[in-house]
């Protein structure tokens, strides 16, 4: 296999003029999660209408404004899903890691079911929804009255809440099944083992440990574990394919693509993350002789 090639583009993935139509073989990503506080500021920067709506929230018609903010955040993400649809080849898979959000607003604790909004937007764009994965995370503590842990009265019915201890890995396909020439060597060299097939194609993934070992900067990007990127790449692409991540963060997808003999393109809007992307990918790039090309818009 020739060395793999990787592009990092520092810019907004709502438009991807650097990528031709129908040229990417898989998309895996984790976007900023709507209605999770740590992403409020960035949503407002990418879409100033959202920032203006947060200001309006102080004064009038709170429930309506909350709905408008939530809608606008998903519309902002949907621009990226639309570009993704354009650049994927027929039959390509798109995997989106997303968590729902809980939040107290206007005096009410509630859940914002991000996964269902993303499914609706992606179906409207033409994607077919496939069975999804629930990533069970052991670290989250139970919640009571919107706080991080059960308080004493959490034992008394009926006012405690279910803990959000799973995130979703939504899976979509563009068009019909992907077509390969008979006995395609790349496809055969990418075959999974029986153990991988049996474990990975089940709906609940219990992946532990990785987050505790990450640096403060990686926590700022809410990096997903390497294991998630590795599995998805092996399950839904073949060697020599090109993988897209429109919300690259710390570069986990680039790193996994490099290690698995796939090419990649990643977009990241926050130029401060470039250092951490370089650091995360440097070993795999050197070990595999991969080429990495970084551009800033
Ligand atoms: C949840 S993080 C991704 C974490 C990544 N999976 C990892 O393992 O490090 C989402 C990333 O998307 C970036 N982002 C948000 N909006 C963007 C946009 N419109 N274009 C490109 N990047 C964006 C954020 O700066 C953030 O780093």
Image (cartoon, grey):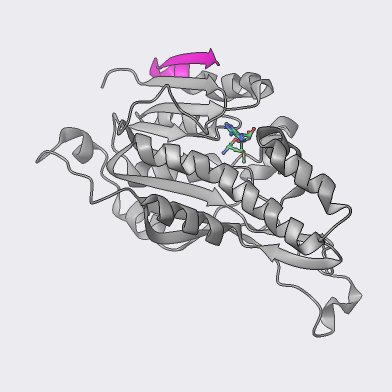
Q: Position of residue 209 (x, y in %)?
A: 63, 47
- Asked if residue 212 is positioned above or below residue 130 in the image, the reply reads above
Q: From where the camera sits, is residue 143 visible?
A: no
Q: Quadrant of residue 221?
A: top right
- Is residue 290 covered in magenta? yes
236 sits to left or right of 279: left
Q: From where the camera sits, is residue 137 visible?
A: yes
Q: Position of residue 182 (x, y in %)?
A: 9, 41
At 71% across and 36% down in the image, what residue appears? 48
Seen as rendered, the residue at the extreme left is: 182
- Asked if residue 161 is positioned above or below residue 74 in the image, the reply reads below
51 sits to left or right of 98: right
The magenta segment is 285-297
Q: Quadrant of ligand 1?
A: top right
- Is residue 152 covered in magenta? no
- Asked if residue 66 is positioned above or below residue 274 in the image, the reply reads below
Which is nearer the eye, 199 or 251? 251
At 87% across and 66% down in the image, what residue appears? 107
Q: Position of residue 166 (x, y in %)?
A: 60, 61
At 61% across and 27% down in the image, what residue appears? 269
198 sits to left or right of 225: left
Q: Position of residue 117 (x, y in %)?
A: 55, 58
For the C terminus, the quadrant is top right
- Asked if residue 238 is positioned above or below residue 193 in the image, the reply reads above
């Amino acid at each position: 296999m020739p060395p793999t090639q990787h592009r990092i583009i520092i810019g907004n993935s709502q438009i991807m003029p650097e990528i031709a139509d129908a040229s990417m073989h898989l998309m895996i990503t984790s976007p900023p999660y709507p209605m999770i506080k740590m992403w409020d500021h960035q949503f407002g920067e990418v879409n100033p209408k959202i920032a203006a709506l947060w200001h309006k929230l102080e004064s009038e018609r709170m429930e309506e404004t909350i709905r408008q903010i939530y809608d606008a955040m998903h519309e902002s993400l949907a621009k990226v899903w639309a570009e993704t649809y354009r650049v994927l080849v027929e039959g390509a898979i798109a995997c989106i890691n997303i968590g729902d959000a809980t939040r107290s607003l206007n005096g009410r604790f509630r859940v914002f079911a991000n996964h269902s909004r993303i499914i609706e937007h992606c179906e409207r764009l033409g994607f077919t929804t496939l069975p999804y994965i629930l990533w069970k995370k052991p670290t989250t503590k139970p919640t009571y009255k919107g706080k991080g842990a059960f308080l004493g009265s959490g034992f008394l019915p009926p006012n405690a809440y279910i803990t959000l201890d799973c995130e979703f890995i939504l899976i979509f396909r563009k068009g019909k099944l992907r077509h390969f020439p008979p006995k395609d060597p790349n496809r055969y060299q990418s075959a999974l083992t029986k153990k991988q097939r049996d474990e990975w194609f089940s709906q609940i993934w219990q992946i532990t440990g990785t987050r505790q070992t990450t640096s403060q900067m990686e926590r700022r990007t809410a990096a997903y574990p390497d294991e998630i990127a590795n599995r998805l790449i092996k399950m839904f692409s073949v060697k020599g394919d090109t993988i897209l991540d429109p919300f690259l963060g710390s570069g986990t997808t680039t790193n996994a693509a490099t290690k698995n003999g796939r090419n990649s393109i990643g977009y990241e809007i926050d130029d401060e993350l470039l250092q951490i992307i370089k650091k995360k990918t440097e070993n795999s790039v050197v070990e595999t002789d991969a080429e990495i090309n970084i551009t800033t818009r």
